[in-house]
Image (cartoon, grey):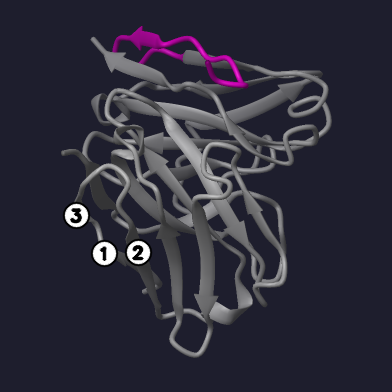
Amino acid sequence: QSVLTQPPSASGTPGQRVTISCSGSSSNIGSNNVHWYQQLSGTAPKLLIYRNNQRPSGVPDRFSGAKSGTSASLAISGLRSEDEADYYCASWDDSLRGLVFGGGTRLTVL
Amino acid sequence: QARLVESGGGLVKPGGSLRLSCAASEFTFSDYYMTWMRRAPGKGLEWLSYISVSGSSIYYADSVKGRFTISRDNTRNSLYLQMNNLTPEDTAVYYCAREGLPRQSYWYFDLWGRGAQVTVSS
């Protein structure tokens, strides 16, 4: 049982826009930044979004992040086959005094 | 190009120990907070431990507290994870990762190693 809650799966067709949600509480998302990671099959995780809505250099602007209250979301527009991966949200938790992750969302491009 | 390379993984029996290393190159290792994460088969990412630039501040996840020890040697550009009393539930790919900004602690990680497989089985 993960501290942050994500849907286990999501899907879309090429060109579509997909949104992945991440729900937490006042001790994590409600009072701290949210970061998103992408993990392609068999590879290391990659930082996708940091501090709620910032993109590292090299990450396409098709990826965007948002946060409101105790929830956050990752949006992917213009879906491409290479976006098929597992996506994780993460945030510091004040009560647990550590980093907590969502359980991950497996994105399938149909 | 900045790089992290894990080593020291392998097969170990329950109750055994293993020491993972993470070699950093092409960046000033001593300027960055560092962390260990893992991903077990069929499960998601799990944060394990985090260490400050000097090693004076350390955090552990409850799942490994008392069994795992993080350390670093800035003279050798290396990060370590000593893992004791291993159980089958510790079977996973273990990753080291670098904090996103030098001398800052924002708890996001922009550089990851490729991972080291640890298998705990009799």
Compared to residue B88, the image places residue B107 above or below, namely below
Q: Residue at x 67, y 77 (%)?
A: B54
Q: Name the main secondary structure of what is drawn in magenta.
A: loop
Tag shown at residue B19: 2
Under circle 1, the secondary element is loop
- Asked if the stretch drawn in magenta spans residue A16, the answer is yes
Q: Which residues are magenta?
A: A1-17
Task: Give yes or no for contact between labels 1 and 2 (Cβ–Cβ under 8 Å).
Answer: yes
| Residue ID for mark 3 | B10
Query: Is disc 1 surrounded by few (<14), some (14 to 19) or many (20+) residues within 10 Å?
Result: some
Task: Looking at the picture, tell me which residue is in the foreground, A82 or B77.
Answer: B77
Task: Looking at the picture, tell me which residue is in the foreground, B21 or B65.
Answer: B65
Task: Give yes or no for contact between labels 2 and 3 (Cβ–Cβ under 8 Å).
Answer: no
Under circle 3, the secondary element is strand
Question: Which label's residue is closer to the chain start, 1 or 2?
Answer: 1
| Residue ID for mark 1 | B8
Q: Is residue B97 something one can see in this rendering?
A: yes
Q: CA distance from mark 1 to mark 2?
A: 6 Å
Q: Amino acid at mark 1?
A: Gly
Q: Position of residue A44 (x, y in %)?
A: 33, 47
Q: Chain of mark 3?
A: B
Q: Amino acid at mark 3?
A: Gly
Q: Residue at x 26, y 44 (%)?
A: A43
